[in-house]
Image: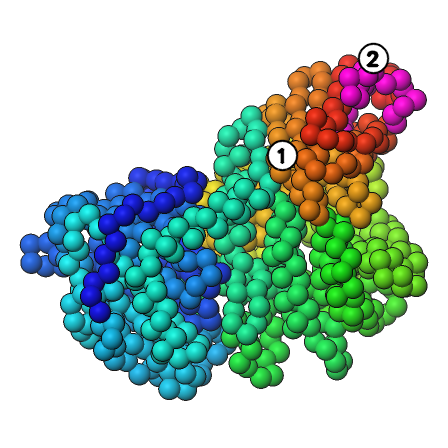
Amino acid sequence: MTQSAHSSDLPATGVSLSRTEGLGQYYDASGRRSVVIGVEGGDSEVWIYPLKAAYELKFAVEAQGQFAALREFIRSFEVAPEASTARFETPSGALDQRILTPVDRPLALFAFRSTAPLRLKASFKSDIKLMWPADTMDQAPEVSVDGSTGAWAVASAVTGDAALIGWGGGEKAAAGEDGIFEQTVVLEPGVWSVFAVAASCEGIDDARGQFADGVDGLPRLYAEAVEYYREFLDSTATIESSDPSLDTAFLWAKIGVEKSYMETPGMGGGYIAGFAPSWGGGRPGFGWYFGRDSSWTGFGANDYGDFAKVRDNIRLLAKYQIPDGPNSGKIYHELSAADDRLQDHNYCFVAGDATPFFVVDIANYYAWTADAAFVREMWPHVKLAMDWCRRMDVDGDLLIDNPPAGHQWYDYGEKNMIDLVAIWAMALDGAARLADVMGDSSAAAWREQSAEVVRILNEDFWNEEEGYLHDRKLPDGSMSSLTTANPTVPLLWGLIEPDKAGRAIRRMGQNDLTIPWGMRTNSNLDDIYRPDGYHEGTVWPLTTGWASLAAFANGDPELGWHHLKANADLTLDWDLGYITEVLGGDEREPSGSPHQAWSEAMVVMPVVEGILGIVPDWPARTISVAPQLPDALSFLALRNLSLGDARMDIEARRTSSSLSLRVAPRDADIAVVFAPFVPAGKTVGRVALGGRELLAGHYALQASGSRWRVLIRAEARGAAGLNLEIEWRDLEPGEQCAV
């Protein structure tokens, strides 16, 4: 095979982030079928799902007759949705490296272009193993030089999986020591030369075809990726605000969630948890399917309007739901991308919250889309899930018990965790709404049970002394003394009574829990507190997002903004463009997975559901908008918000004395419930709707925590939209905020 060289410039989306300092950080580049994980300018590993195709992949440049690691010469690193770019200044000239993972091809491409002739050597290892837990299988590969391509051919005699790895032409491949494979190429100045990694579960012939397409089709594959991401960005919601850094963070949070969508042959597509190096093992960080993780991630995807992938993710959850036996109806916690080849692999089903959250998922999707056909498709799975949840109430107190249900996001085997109780309340309510669609008589009972679970939350879990919520009930019936982030879950869904919620939010904001970079999982006053303990005091962007949503939902926009910005500011740190899994409780340092999908969802959700307070009800053609812009934000516009197949724009502006809000449907009339908060210490002065001043009797005030909301229902029609203007005034001494 002759060297594949492409002289044309490659297109770009125009969306990118770059740095020239602090280089050598973790990076990843992912498509639906592949991911490259590595260090900027340095070693990488390549997964062609579900295969670990290459690892310890590195490049070296010849200088003065010797090869030197290319990482020594890195000068900048840039990420874009379509590809990542490293730029080097070698002794012989400048060199660009583009790392492309095509959207839907089992390929990873490393394209190089230099200003002068350069000799590059690639070296790597490969054992073509299936992803965990199948990596323990005896899969010693057969390795040879492929006669038609000149690349390395790696094949498993056990599984039939195969890979082709090497330059699209180049010098003869040569084996190094310790299982290291090498191949060298001479770069022609000004043209792109491609090092490709292709793999297939269908055998060597398919891998060879993918390889050839990769090295010969670089401009086309690049253009396809650019077109795909342009369409993704154009078809989903965007924001524009008075804080450009927030706009950037929202944009890249969308991209981060999109990048976590994976497709596996024979299984389907869904959201994985995140990315991290496998450190020589068979697990690419958290690069496989999770139940609870994908549910939180899917909430974020609904908010920006990627309903098709949310639907795919729910279908994947349903596909691997346990169909029969004592755990029939249970949803997996973890699902390896190799699971379609394995038998009796039960590690997946250890979570207690994934199953009720599955029902919440479907109800949330339906609220955004009014997709009754999908509800009918999922209804048998909903009933199975609800039956399983009912069986997990072993003592008849209406709560899911652990054990036997399984663990939650954070627990030590206690009887009831508050986050699971909240999810169960939402599942009962969601199942009732889905039952209404199906005409099922279970709706009334489920609504009644949901109300009772909410009562239990407010009475049994309320800690009057602390002004907060107990995070768990212990096996002996007593309540835990720990102070954790878990009570943010019922708070963010508005399940706690207003007065109690207001006190809980104030307690949440104290500095044993809230710190500059987010919310600790445990108070540093707890005996178990460890700043580096995974669930004993670290700061998770997930829980920081919960805290932001809880604060906004209960009338504290300043605390909500603090936590949102803590997450948003991570976009430019460490893994450029993406957000880590965990930070230290005492030091702002990352750990865990460098790129975590639900962390990115916790930038999207606090903007859409928090600052703007958007609650969809598309089956009723209604949307609730309850904006509360913090002091640091004077303007926020949400463009191209999707409800079903309809689109709309929402703009909010604030001054010290007023709020203006515009809701503009693009292609469908919609009923709007305006519910903005009245700032603390203020009362309503003037209210105008569509330019006409409203008398007091035409709007209402509703208490919410320590704050009040203005309530107005109106119709928004046409692109001109509907404008609401509210002016505030200071409360007089002894005056109450009332109409």
The amino acid sitting under disc 1 is Leu
Name the residue: 48% across, 74% down: 132
Q: Amino acid at mark 2?
A: Glu
| Extent of the magenta region | 676-700
Q: Tell me if I can see residue 2 in this picture.
A: yes
Residue 405 coordinates in the image, percent (x, y): 73, 70
Q: Which color mode does the image show?
A: rainbow
Neighbour class for label 1 at 10 Å: few (<14), some, many (≥20)? Answer: many
Q: Is residue 696 magenta?
A: yes
Q: Quadrant of the N terminus?
A: bottom left
Give the mark nearer the N terminus: 1 vs 2.
Answer: 1
Q: Secondary structure at mark 1?
A: strand
- Label 2 sits on a secondary structure element that is loop
Where residue 732 is drawn, which disc sits there?
A: 2
For this orientation, the residue located farthest to the left is 64
Image point 87% across, 16% down: which residue? Answer: 734
| Residue beneath disc 1 | 638
459 or 210: nearer the viewer: 210
Task: State which mark lies toward you, 1 or 2.
Answer: 1
Q: Is residue 304 above or below residue 417?
A: above
Q: Position of residue 230 (x, y in %)?
A: 48, 45
Give how far across and how far down residue 486 sits, in percent.
69, 51
Nearest the eye: 554 or 695: 695
Residue at 51% x, 30% y is 244
Q: Which mark is residue 567?
A: none
- Residue 281 visible somewhere in the drawing: no
Mark 1 to mark 2: distance in Å?
A: 35 Å
